[in-house]
Image (tube, grey):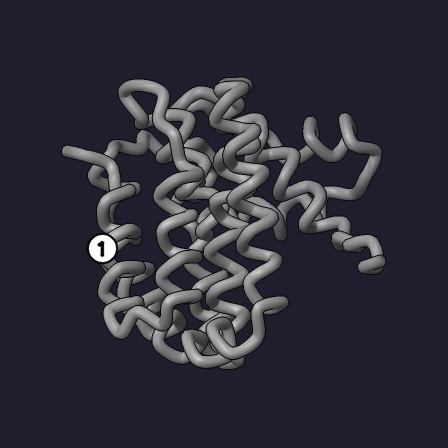
Amino acid sequence: MAPPVVHSLREQIREHILEGIVGGRWQPGERIVERRIAAELLVSQTPVREALRELESLRLIESAPNKGARVRELTAADVKESYPVRAGLERVAAELAAEALAADPSALEPLEREVAALREADRAGDTEAQARHTVAFHREIVRASGNAVLLHTWESLGIEVWTTLSIRWLSPEPRAHAEDHARIVAAFRDRDPRIGVLLHDHVMGCAPRV
């Protein structure tokens, strides 16, 4: 059994703030007060400040002297900007991972598990689970590339954040995700020479419409 994932205090605070933004606790333009979050979570202001800086680097938060941190007014165009970069990275990852995933059937099991979880999320209309398992699926492909620089760059884009926003904020209607991802697994299994292009087009097809 895999060991439990231990998140740092900063990461836990970051997720707390992110959930508040996505869930509507803090509205666009609303100020996020460090000391209130610190008091609420019984922590010092230092890790709260670090978490806010990280969210600012992902363009979710904006800050100004003497005005503190506020939630950015995000549009579909803001979210869409990261998709061409992500699509390019995932095309390279798919091409690097293709041989390993096709040669060892067990290497595809993590992807198949995420597809099964996505089917359940689709049936339940659970957008939170859809976002979580979509991100996990794509991370497995990038990880399978065996390229640590590629994985670090991909993660630095804040994929969880933008995928969650795309699915929960910007999807005009419920959408099934499992079958699209099942086709990608099949392409790896069949050694489709176009796997990089297929994954690139899949990612771009998920970008918000503006």
Residue closer to the observer: 163 or 120: 120
Q: In this view, does 198 lie to the left or right of 115?
A: left
Image x and y of residue 77, in percent: 20, 39
> Residue shown at 71%/44% (left/top)?
12
> Residue shown at 50%/22% (left/top)?
123
Q: In this view, does 92 lie to the left or right of 138?
A: left
Q: What element carries label 1?
A: helix
> Residue shown at 45%/23% (left/top)?
30
Say which quadrant the C terminus sits in.
top left
Residue 139 higher or lower than 132, as above or below: below
Q: Farthest residue toward the left?
A: 210
Q: In this view, does 69 lie to the left or right of 47?
A: left
Q: Name the residue under label 1.
A: 201
**Visible in this render: residue 68?**
no
Mark 1: give few (<14), some (14-19) or many (20+) Cα within 10 Å.
some
Q: In this view, does 4 lie to the left or right of 128?
A: right
